[in-house]
Amino acid sequence: MTRTFLTQNRSVFWFLLALGIFALIVTVLSDAAGNGMISTSFVKTLGKTLCLMLVAVAMDVVWGYTGILSLGHMAFFGLGGYMIGMWLMYARTEIIVTESLLAAAIPPTPQEIHDAIGTQIFGVVGSSEFPAIWIFAHSFWLQIAMVVLVPGLLALVFGWLAFRSRVTGVYLSILTQAMTLALSLYLFQNESGLRGNNGLSGLQNLPGLDDVPQATLSIAFFWASATALGLGYVLFAWVTSGKFGSVIRGIRDNESRVRFLGYHVEGYKLFVFTLTGIVAGIAGALYYPQAGIINPNEIAPIASIYLAVWVAIGGRGRLYGAALGAAFVSLLSSWFTSGAVPSVPLGFYTIQWTDWWLVLLGVSFVAVTLLAPKGIGGLFDLISTRHPTPARVGDFGPDTGARRTAEGEEEK
Amino acid sequence: MKTLLEMSGVSVSFDGFKAINNLSFRIGEPELRAIIGPNGAGKTTFMDIITGKTRPDEGTVIYGEKSISLLKMSESQIAMAGVGRKFQKPTVFEAQTVRENLAMALKNKRGPFDVLLYRKTKRGAERIEELAEIIGLTDALPRVAGELSHGQKQWLEIGMLLAQDPRLLLVDEPAAGMTPAEREHTTDLLKRAAKKHAVVVVEHDMEFIRRLDCRVTVLCEGSVLAEGSLDHVTSNPQVIEVYLGR
């Protein structure tokens, strides 16, 4: 089965090969290998980029394959980050607090430790009580389950409500924007229990691994992200190939026709929306420990719009296109916004790329949409023979007066 | 011949315009039935009601041995219950190959998990080959449906209808864009299907209907004007006035 799957989906093989080679090269050149050609912070940037590629692949399945332009998938990404962040903060604070309390004359009770952790974490928002949503934060495995469950449930409930009312097209996009905006506004409040606009921080410090240098941790996360991307790619390639892929592409192109064939369109949309929501959550859970901090700004509506831009520039409807688009645009974006790009003095005005990058991105988005709708992924058609122009089959017309196939061949 | 579908007292209006007006209709299984009528007579709305696309304001639509009401079912449930439809304008999935189009229509479980875990079977492949043979698209199986000619798309859609293996086939203008030979072939196909199932054909072409040689229902302004053999209805003065006379 694997063999037929790989032979039918060549891009999976090439993608995994390229990903593996890339991961090996980065590892060899990293600080962790003592080489130092690639700085630890750049390894983190690359690791984060791999997570963004994963969420872009998920976005491509929702948008490029199923035709649902969701502008809210970064909400799931952010929620995944928050969920892992809760455990990271709790567990690390627990270690620090326990150490300091052990120095006291009377050994602390578990309740005292718990309260002290609360004071440490929530002091910044003027509170020391643990909100109810932190109930599982002490347990790594429960919180890992939340990484999957929370984005999954949100996607399931939101999708169920939206799809059963047959909200489609631009209205659905607006609804998803509203969802991510509402979530981000809610999280901005201190009462939300996730430290308001401070967000969760210090996530790069893994509890109990203080002795392990960040160089090694960054490579570990880089590999974890690469593995997640590889697995996610295979998963989505499997989902979008075969009959399921045929049905969801049918839904994209003509929803009501699929319905008249007897397929429950809403069920398919809900399945795709939820599955990609969960994968986005997992990608977020890998991203934020590398970023070190998460705050409600991360799930502002603009984040999800960026996601759509990456997929559009990379090329909708092919998974590697979305992945390349995310990598290309996000790396270019961090380069431009880092200030490393020389300014362009025009005499009367100097173009500072930190300010003008968004304009450049906007222009290239419009240009890609108008001039090269296949995006970066379309470049692969130039070297591939996957979509050959079909050769003429049979004669030129139905009756004997029409030209024969052979006559057409002669003209070639 | 037992009744498969019975509509009674069905009315539907769009913004005050009565598209269907107290329509009653009954078809048995097996039976072949042709529906004719001038433009705006409500032929397409009639099909929309049966397939669940349009909800009537009043009336009942009863289907099958268990006399289930189609009005409470969604489009996909109705399709799964055995109602297949071929649209007036051929609507195939143009971005996909002929084989994929047929495979999607093939009678199988339709749930997302069933489809995700679906494995191609030999029987399914044979059925596709068989259907392709019937609709004359064997060579075109690996081709993208968007490349097909209008007539071939019509054939593909008929193939998709047959692949669903429905009990009630609603066929809207099957002969449009076909050569005379192809029309004959279509007639044969429909007649063959009507030996086992219920087939409703909406058509404008009188010659085509004459070849079908079946009971004809004349629709006008949303209700049945006349019903009977073609010769019977064409001699009806009212029919001549609203439809044939012009």
Image (cartoon, coloured by chain):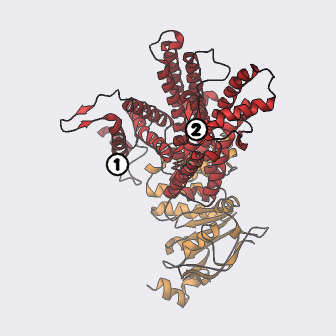
Chain colours: A red, B orange
Name the residue that disc number 1 marks.
A403
Residue furthest to the bottom: B237
Q: Secondary structure at mark 1?
A: loop
- Of residue A272 and residue A362, the one placed in the foreground of this image is A362
Q: Is residue B156 above or below residue A100?
A: below
- Of the residues shown, which amino acid type is indicated by label 2? Gly
Residue A11 in sight here? yes
- Look at 49% across and 42% down and name the residue there: A303
Local SS, label 2: loop
Q: Which residue is mark 2?
A: A199
Mark carried by residue A320? none
**Up-down relation of residue B59 to residue A90 (above or below):** below
Q: Position of residue A190 (x, y in %)?
A: 61, 45
Residue reaching furthest to the front: A105
Camera-side residue: A327 or A399?
Answer: A327
Question: Which chain is disc 2 placed on?
Answer: A
Q: Earlier in the sequence, mark 2 or mark 1?
A: 2
> How far is the residue under mark 2 from the one under mark 1?
73 Å
Q: Residue at x 63, y 54 (%)?
A: A266
Query: Is residue A263 visible to us here?
Result: no
Q: Are marks 2 and 1 in one subunit?
A: yes
